[in-house]
Image (cartoon, helix red, strand yellow):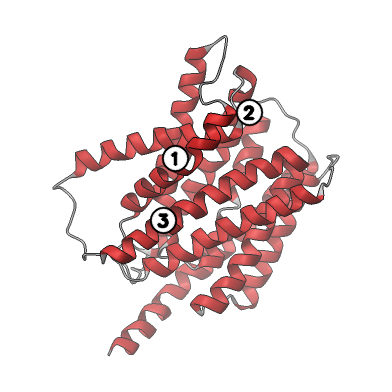
Amino acid sequence: MSHPSAVGLPVGRGLFYLVVAGAAWGTAGAAASLLYRASDIGPVSLSFWRYVGGLALLLGVHALRRGRRAPRPAEPLRRKVRRVLATGIGLTVFQTAYFAAVQETGLAVGTVVTLGSGPVLIALGARLLLGERLGLGGLLAVGGALLGLAVLVLGGQGATVQPWGIALGVIAAAGYASITLMTRFWGRGGDADPLSTTTWAFAVGALLLLPFGLLEGLVPQSADPVRVVWLLAYVAAVPSALAYALYFAGAAVVRSATVSVIMLLEPVSAAAIAVLLLGEELTVPTVLGTLLMLVAVVGLAVAETRGAPAARRLAAGTAG
């Protein structure tokens, strides 16, 4: 049974949203690889069109659900502006710095640094800023997840470590950590609409990336433009509009450290796609790393759902 959180969304459903979002994010890398093969698009321009396409889809969803959604508590305008700007900037820093880290030091090392540093920064931030305790079981789960991630992306591969690439990976992790912590903090009030948050964050990100995209070249050149358009549409719809809306909804009700570990499903999903669809070899490190990370995710999910009733009773006692 899923227990309701302080913002009304059941914790179990929030966990499900995060799992779907993590799996969807894992498909973005494969789509990006296909786009790079089919055109001369660059990472900044790809991120820009990802935001623009996702923004168009979300605006359409807003128009369709206008007048149908249940009323929500009014969010103060100043707080909404701060939330939207902070989320948009954090999202832009995270994605752009990550793509730059991969370009500088390679996919394996860039992924390890970014996704490996994220849970550590989030756990520390959640403890210092939000008062969330991870516990021994949570610490073991985070450690197991990080070990699985390292085995998954470094096992059997040659890795070239570049100091600037490492720094970019840490910057990307800091951007990701800030998004997770802010979403959890503002989600406690119950007046932040996840779909609205995603829409405005995409608008901010598109505006921030526009001048850099113009320098890089916004319109990709390709011998197969139809394929490029379809791939861009997929990136905008599934790992962007859908995944981020689900992420913001789930991250508002699930503990920050748990969110960070569940999002490590992204490289698991990417590894599965690489083996099943792109013809990459299924290796022992791939299997071992995937199993370690999945065990960690399941362990934290079970702990999260069991801890929800106690947290709700504590909140009710404090309110009374």
- Amino acid type of disc 1? Ala
Q: Secondary structure at mark 3?
A: helix
Labels in figure, total: 3
Residue 288, image x, y percentages: 75, 49
Q: Secondary structure at mark 2?
A: helix
Q: Is residue 275 visible?
A: yes
Residue 309, image x, y percentages: 39, 76
Residue 233, image x, y percentages: 44, 27
Q: Quadrant of residue 73?
A: bottom left
Label annotation for residue 17: none
Q: Which residue is mark 3?
A: 85
Q: Is residue 151 visible?
A: no
Dot in front, 3 or 2: 3
- The Cα atoms of the two marked residues, 3 and 2, are separated by 30 Å
Q: Which residue is mark 2?
A: 33
Residue 227, image x, y percentages: 51, 16
**What quarter of the picture does the C terminus occupy?**
bottom left
- Which residue is at a point 64% across and 20% down the rendered structure image? 37
Q: Residue furthest top?
A: 223
Q: Earlier in the sequence, mark 3 or mark 2?
A: 2
- Which residue is at a point 45% across and 60% down the rendered structure image? 251
- Which residue is at a point 39% across and 61% down the rendered structure image? 83
Dot in front, 2 or 1: 1
Q: How would you rate the neighbour count of disc 3 (Cα within 10 Å): few for under 14, some for 14-19, many for 20 or more?
A: some
For the residue pair 136 and 154, the one nearer the viewer reads as: 154
- Which residue is at a point 38% across and 62% down the rendered structure image? 82
- Amino acid type of disc 3? Leu
Label annotation for residue 206: 1
Q: Earlier in the sequence, mark 1 or mark 3?
A: 3
